[in-house]
């Protein structure tokens, strides 16, 4: 199993970013996917979940209404569209797949500041 995140960067408050997570090594379309984030000095926290077919999604209260998770099973990729970004969204963002075990990507840095 391999997960590779991309799309992070630095933006001003109110800006947008779109993260991608390319998956390989397992039957992507059979598994729900999650995004987590970890800010400096804090524990990793759940951001969002999308079901295998994409029909169900869940969000942490802190991102609800601003972030949108989606997936393209033909491309084995899950996305995280982040709008109205706030400084408190600054973190390393990780995608996660539970395929017998928890697998994580290397993470992508998102920095929101003036």
Image (cartoon, rainbow, N blue to C red):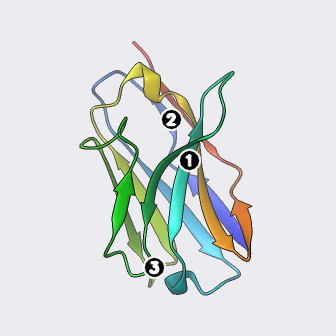
The residue depicted at 45 percent of the width and 60 percent of the height is 49
Q: Position of residue 19 (x, y in %)?
A: 46, 51
Task: Report x, y in % for residue 42.
Answer: 65, 26
Q: Residues within 10 Å of mark 3 (few under 14, many from 20)?
A: some
Tell me where residue 1 appears, x and y as whole percent. Answer: 74, 74
Residue shown at 56%/32% (left/top)? 91
Whichever of labels 2 and 3 marks the residue nearer the N terminus, that label is 2
Instruction: State which mark lies toward you, 1 or 2.
Output: 1
Residue nearer the viewer, 41 or 3 = 41
Residue that label 1 marks: 36
Q: CA distance from mark 1 to mark 2?
A: 16 Å
Farthest residue toward the top? 114
Picture coordinates of residue 107, whole percent (x, y): 65, 47
Q: As drawn, is 15 to the left or to the right of 48?
A: left
In the image, is residue 40 above or below residue 59?
Answer: above
Q: Could you tell me which secondary element the residue under label 1 belongs to?
A: strand
* Residue holding disc 3: 52
Q: Which of these two is toward me, 112 or 46? A: 46
Cα distance, mark 2 to mark 3? 28 Å
Whether 112 is drawn above or below 56: the answer is above
Q: Earlier in the sequence, mark 1 or mark 2?
A: 2
Residue shown at 66%/23% (left/top)?
Answer: 40
In front: mark 2 or mark 3? Answer: 3
Q: Secondary structure at mark 2?
A: strand
- Which residue does the numbered mark 2 point to in the structure image? 9
Callout 3: SS: loop
Image quadrant in which the C terminus is located: top left
């Amino acid at each position: 199993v391999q997960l590779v995140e991309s799309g992070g960067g630095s933006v001003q408050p109110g800006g947008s970013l779109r993260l991608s997570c390319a998956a390989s090594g397992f039957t992507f379309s059979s598994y729900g996917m999650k995004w987590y984030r970890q800010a400096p000095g804090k524990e990793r926290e759940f951001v969002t979940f999308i079901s295998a077919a994409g029909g169900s999604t869940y969000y942490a209260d802190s991102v609800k209404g601003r972030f949108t998770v989606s997936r393209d099973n033909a491309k084995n990729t899950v996305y995280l569209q982040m709008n109205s970004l706030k400084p408190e969204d600054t973190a390393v963002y990780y995608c996660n797949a539970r395929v017998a075990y928890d697998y994580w990507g290397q993470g992508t840095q998102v920095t929101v500041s003036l």
